[in-house]
Structure formats: C-alpha cells, structure tokens
Image (tube, helix red, strand yellow):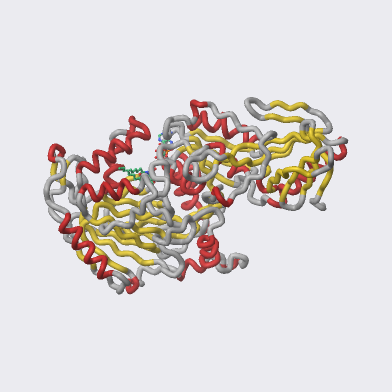
Amino acid sequence: MDLKLESSLWVGNKRYRAVLTGWHLKWTEVDKKNRDKKTVSVPVAEVVGVEEGRVEILPQKSVEDTDKDFTVFYVKRSSGGGSGGLLWRLGRTQFSCPSRVLRDQWTKHLRAALKTHSPLRPHRLLVFINPFGGKKKGRQIYHSLVAPLFELAGISSHVIVTERANQARDHLLKKDLTGFDGVVCVGGDGMFSELLHGLVGRTQQEAGLCENDPAVALQPCPLHIGIIPAGSTDCVCYATVGVIDPVTSALHIIIGDSQPLDVCSVHHSSALVRYSVSLLGYGFYGDVLAESEKHRWMGPLRYDYSGTMVYLSNRSYSGTVKYLPADPLLSSPRDKTRCLAGCGVCSRSTERLFPHSSDSGSLYSSHFSQFSTDSEGEWVSVEGRFRCLSLTCMSSSCARSPQGLSPSAHLADGTGDLILVWDTHPLSFLKFLYRHTSTQDQFDLPFVEVHRVKAVRFSVPSGREEQEYEEIGGLSSETDGEREHVDTVSRNGSQQHLAERATTNEQKTATPFLCGLCCKKSPAVSVWNCDGEILPFTEILCKIHGQLVRLYARGIEDRAAVHNSQERDECRRMCIPKSLT
Ligand SMILES: Nc1ncnc2c1ncn2[C@@H]1O[C@H](COP(=O)(O)OP(=O)(O)OP(=O)(O)O)[C@@H](O)[C@H]1O
Ligand SMILES: CCCCCCCCCCCCC/C=C/[C@@H](O)[C@H](CO)NC(=O)CCCCC
Ligand SMILES: [Ca+2]
C-alpha cells in the first residue's frame, strides 16, 4: 500500500491540509485567503492510536460514533519535567472528513503506517505491580494512568500484583512467557532488579550459558523491560527517561522505544551473586542502605535520615581495588559529555559489541574474546582507605542527584565508571556528597578518582572479610588512611595523583568527628549496596556486559534539540489526580 495520503480535513471549524508521508503525519491550517499557517508534525512512530469517531479517553472513555470523523492520539511533549528530560503527555486531535470513504482511507493508512514504522510496539505485556513500593501507590498509578493508555493503544496486558518479594523474578525464571513482547514493573529499582534477574537468568538458562563464569559472554535478553516508576529512588527510570512520570513511561512503552542497557555481573568465589545497573557501592552507600533497612517504615525519607546518620558516623574502610580500564580513546568519565537520546558513543558501541549482528550465526560471539580473568597484565591495582567505592553502568541520576553519580557515564557503551573516594576530612567528604546535588564537578577534588572500566575486583586485608558488619554508630577506630598506589601499568598523571593524595592524608586528622556519636567501635568492613540490596559478600569480582538488556525508553531527550511543533489547541493534557503526583 502506498502510505502517502493528502487531503483537506477539518479540525473544529478550521480547514487543514493534512498529509501522511511515510514518517510523519502533518496538518497545516489553511486560512480564507488560502495561505498556509503553522504546521503540526507528528512522527508516525509517536502516534499512540487512531480511532473512528470522536473519541476521548479521560476522565472516562467516550466515543461519539460519527462516520466522517476520526481521532488521532499521539505523544506531545510538555515543558515540565524538572532538570532532567521532557514530560510526555497524550495529544489528541479530532479530524472531520468530507466523506466516510475518505475517513476509512485515513484510518487504514495511518494504521498501516504504524505497523511499518514501529516494529517494536508491544501487543502483549506481562505487568508486575508491587503494591508496597515507594509511597504504596503502584496499583492506583497503574489502573488510573497507565491501563487506559495501554487499552487505547490496543495492548493487552496480563497483570500480576505481587504478594511477596521475588515473585516477579521467580515467575520470569520459571513460567511460560510465550506470546509476551515485554515485561513491565510498576515499582522502584528493586522491582526493576527482579525483572532484570528473572529475564537475564531465563535467557542464559535457555541459551545453555553459565552465569557463574565472569568470562562467559551472556546472551542479551529478547524481551524488553518497561518501568512505570512507583518506588523510592527510581534511579533506572530517571537515568533512562529523564523524568519520574508514569504517563511518560507508559507512552515510551506503547510506542516501542528501545534503549539498550549495560549490566554488571557480580561474582564471589566463582559464583554469580547478583546483577547491577545503577550502583554497586561499598562504604558510605553500603552503610546508608544497611542503616535505611531498619527504617523502611519512613518510606523514601529513610535514605535522607540514614544518609545523615552514616555521614555523622564518619567511617572509612581499607581495601584493594583492581580494575580493568576501558579504552580511553573511546570516551572518558571526565569528558563533560552527557549520554542523551541517540548517543553516538553508545551507537558506536553497538557495532563494536555486536559486529556481525545481521549474521545470526555469529551473533554476540564477539563478547567471548572481550574479557578474560587471566588477562591480569592490564589490570590496575590500588589500595588504601576509602570513604566509598562506587561502580555504576550509567549516570545513576535521580531526583536526589539530577546529574548522578557519574554524569558522563553511558547507558550502553559496555563500560562502567568506578569512583574511588579516598579517606578524607569529614567536611571534604561532605563537599563531595553535596556536589552530587548541584552541577559542580564531584570529581574535581583531590581525594576523588574516577575510571572508566570493564571489570573490577575488590578485596579486604586478610582476616577482615569474616568480621561481622556491626550496627552503625561509631567512629573509625583506625587513624589516617594509609594507602598505597600500586598501579601495574603506568598512567599519565599518576605522580600528581599521588602527591594530591599525600596532602589529603595529612589533612585528615584522627580527631573524632561529632564525639557524641562515638558510641561503638567501627566495623572493619562495610557492605556492598547492589542496586539497593545488601550483598552477602565483601570480596567480589564485577564484569560489565554491554547492552545485555533493552528497556522501553530512548535515553534522556535534549530539551534544546527537541522542537515541538505540535499545536496546542487540540492537544489535551491528561488529567493527573494530585494524589498521584
Ligand atoms: N508484595 C511484596 N511484598 C513485599 N516485598 C515486595 C513485594 N513485591 C515486591 N517486593 C520487593 O520490594 C522491594 C522494594 O520495592 P520497589 O523497588 O518497588 O520499591 P522501593 O524500594 O520503594 O523503591 P526503590 O527501589 O526505587 O528505592 C523490591 O526489592 C521487591 O523485591
Ligand atoms: C549534603 C547532601 C548529600 C546528598 C548526597 C546525595 C548523593 C546521592 C547519590 C544518589 C545515587 C543513587 C544511586 C542509585 C541507587 C539505587 O540503585 C538504590 C536503589 O534504589 N538506591 C539506594 O541505594 C539509595 C541510596 C541513597 C544514597 C543517599
Ligand atoms: Ca555504561
């Protein structure tokens, strides 16, 4: 079918010239003197649905079944959305045709264009709702904001409201998933993590691959993951969409957007422990999580309370970090760029990670040659006392930290950013933490290092791993952070790093910080925070798997680059009840 269609249509009492080309639906008002006015242009890929008659879906679906009218629903960008990405809303325009024949031609052509230009649009979704995540509004959010949109887009969904932790993960590992195009969670990072573990595990089982071996190239998951944010931090949603907004996320799912995501596998003693995408954190972030688990009843506020308590407890930990640097010619965590929708670094990584993707026989085989635990020659090793260590596969931006842990990290480049924060004076550490909340460079501090890496190993001084992690509330009993740089490869500027660190060492005094809080001996080891879960091991090996999963998202849209030419009059904002915002 030739998808091009052009005719004169009415919107309200105004006449428009409407054109459907392969990629866009455009309509331009024609005034009495036949001069063209402003054009509204909607990419076909962003059309949500086409209905016969005059249709509204909110607050309730109503259809006026007239035989010369049709209604188009589409994505409309709104200026809200804070400092991150753009909010998406449902736009709606009702067109009137001179005849029923022309109306049927328009609806038929539009539906055919949708099929051609949006191959990844889901038809059937498996949805898991965590009724207890975040502010406990998951069910409400899904039924009032998301389900009507899925219905409009002709998506059928099988909804499971979870009754226990890990139900979603276990379902994905064991149950029949035939017929589903994607899996959606309504919840926070913990729910996303359940879907991640279920889908990655299932895919490897079916491919006969061993997840325990860090040298194995894991098989990317065939099903897409959608996230309807309803948690406390919602970091994965924020960092891949740019806003925490259920309607925006639902629209990304409906139009079948596709964003690959790097995943880090965490191993201990030759066994897989967990997967991580947003934060693998030891020291401060591990302690905050351990403390916050005791205050779950506080809801999202538990992190602020625990963050303050842990900060005041003024801890640092010894350890050895080894890392396998990524190719510095490809990108750098300090290059001041941002991974935005259509990111060139990530697109080029797709070609590097899957060079023969059109040749199904050799698909993904390149992964096997990428990593070897024996290639110790390339590893860099550092040891000393740290305030915190973090490894993140993406920026990990969230409402608390709009730029994230590593503002220039990439979602899908096959690398992670390793952030080493050496022991320092409490006020210097506060400065580092505070910079996460602003646009100031948190890496431009003498006690902070950031490296783009492919793998990381962490170990503690012998004899310490077995020591139990005690309750928070004490000062470090050890004094200054004696640390040593034992790089096994020479790096530019390492001399300068050493000098800077020496100064930092002197700056740090053994003077107790806020003596009132030194009620207990500080533990010798911290715990690992793995995307909000405490790991049961201290000594770990981590490997980044490039683009292992795909999300219904497109990365953060650059406000400046998106010119929204859609007309305002006919576009209606979805009405969101205040109680859900
Ligand atoms: N029905 C349930 N009962 C108890 N726990 C559940 C249930 N369903 C899911 N969970 C668990 O609850 C944990 C937290 O949920 P979720 O991630 O949705 O919210 P959150 O912790 O408030 O948000 P965030 O992870 O963004 O901080 C998840 O790790 C998940 O395994
Ligand atoms: C003086 C102001 C100091 C403010 C410091 C702000 C620093 C914020 C950095 C936030 C980084 C979030 C990384 C994402 C972590 C998630 O996978 C995880 C699960 O949801 N959340 C936490 O562990 C919750 C962790 C919360 C840590 C505070
Ligand atoms: Ca990455």
- Residue 389, quarter of the rendered image: bottom left
Give the image location of residue 247, x and y in percent: 56, 37
Q: How many marks?
A: 0
Q: Is residue 31 left or right of residue 179?
A: right
Left/right of residue 499 with respect to residue 211 in the rendered view: left
| Res 250 visible | no
Q: Nearer the viewer, residue 101 or 496?
A: 496
Residue at position x 40%, y 51% in the image: 276
Front residue of this view, candidates 272 and 131: 131
Q: Which residue occupies 29% across, 56% down? A: 445
Residue 473 on image: x %, y %: 18, 40
Above or below 499: residue 196 = above
Where residue 17 appears, as percent x and y from the top left, is 80, 43
Residue 442 visible in the snapshot: yes
Across and down, in percent, residue 339 comes to: 49, 55
Q: Where in the image, quadrant-wise, is ligand 1 located?
A: top left
Q: Residue at x 45, y 49 (%)?
A: 197
Q: Residue at x 46, y 67 (%)?
A: 330
Residue pushed farthest front?
A: 33
